Image (cartoon, grey):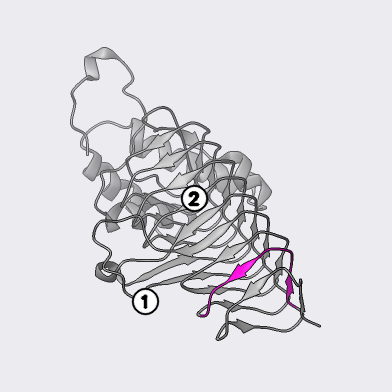
Amino acid sequence: MTTIDPSARVAPGATLGKDVSIGPYCIIGPNVVLGDGCRLLAHVHLAGHTSIGANTVIYPFASLGTPPQSVKYRGGPTKLIVGANCEIREHVTMNTGTEDAGGTTEVGSGCLFMVGSHVAHDCRLGNNITFANNASVAGHVTVGDYVFLGAFGGVHQFVRIGEGAMIGGVSGVRDDVIPFGYAVGQHAKLVGINVVGMKRRGYSKQDMHRLRRAYKELFAGTGNFRDRVVSVAKEFDGDPLVGKLIAFINEGGERQLAHPPLRNSALAGREDS
């Protein structure tokens, strides 16, 4: 049974699924769609052409579906789509897309957004992602499944973060981070593989050893980086984990690839990518 607190405001045209709960002082716009079992605890603001998946829980003072913070936005009916079974905590903000980038911001299922985190316009976020308190991604960012973004982390526009990666707290990410990578720092650099995340997902020691070996050959081997990519692809041909890493590198994007810190001052200024 759907319940709506008398103090809430649900605009005509909004679509509510079965067993939705809308708490005190929530405001729901006319183009909002709530899936079955959604719970809005109190003081939630949902605007724009926004769709929220089934069984998602939204905490007080979250504001979703507001216009993008972009000078290129022209007021069009762009969208925000959030998947099922997400937990969206207090003061989280998510914007709709812009007309020039497909018009949609997408968030997958099973995600946790902690207090004050932010998803900007035209982002593409996968499933089972965690944003810690006040973590933010700028526009056009792509985030793979099972990524963890640490507290107060900030991701530059157009950056790609691969599946299973972890970004340490208070880190600024301006370069693409490989799948299963662990990056940290004011200007985040790779410091290894996200072993903790892999263990939590049930990967074996053998899986992690292979990925670590591929990582070392890619980022600590001799010769040109592109040659090492080709060599590792041949050596680990058919390995699904290393294959994801190689595919991510070969796909490329707007930003350059994050590397480990230079090992010593003699390497300063070396262009290896």
User: Residue visible at 46% across and 72% down?
Assistant: 48
N-term mark: 1 or 2: 1
**Residue at label 2?**
118
Residue 222 location in percent, x, y? 27, 31
255 above or below 20?
Answer: above
In 3D space, how far apart are the residues under numbered discs 1 and 2 (Cα atoms)? 20 Å
Of residues 232 and 99, the one drawn nearer to the viewer in this rendering: 99
Query: CB under 8 Å between callouts 1 and 2?
Result: no
Residue 97 location in percent, x, y? 36, 66
112 above or below 259?
Answer: below
Indicate left or right for 154 with 35 as reference: left
* Amino acid type assigned to the residue bearing label 1 in the image: Pro
- Residue that sits furthest to the front in the current view: 7
Residue 149 location in percent, x, y? 52, 43
Indicate left or right for 270 with 151 as reference: left
Check if residue 22 falls in the magenta segment.
Answer: yes
User: Residue visible at 67% across and 55% down?
Assistant: 60
* Amino acid type assigned to the residue bearing label 2 in the image: His
Indicate left or right for 14 with 4 as reference: left
Quarter of the image holding residue 141?
A: bottom left
Residue span colored magenta = 20-30
Quarter of the image holding residue 270?
A: top left
* Res 134 label: none
**Residue at label 1?**
77
Q: Main secondary structure of the magenta part?
A: loop
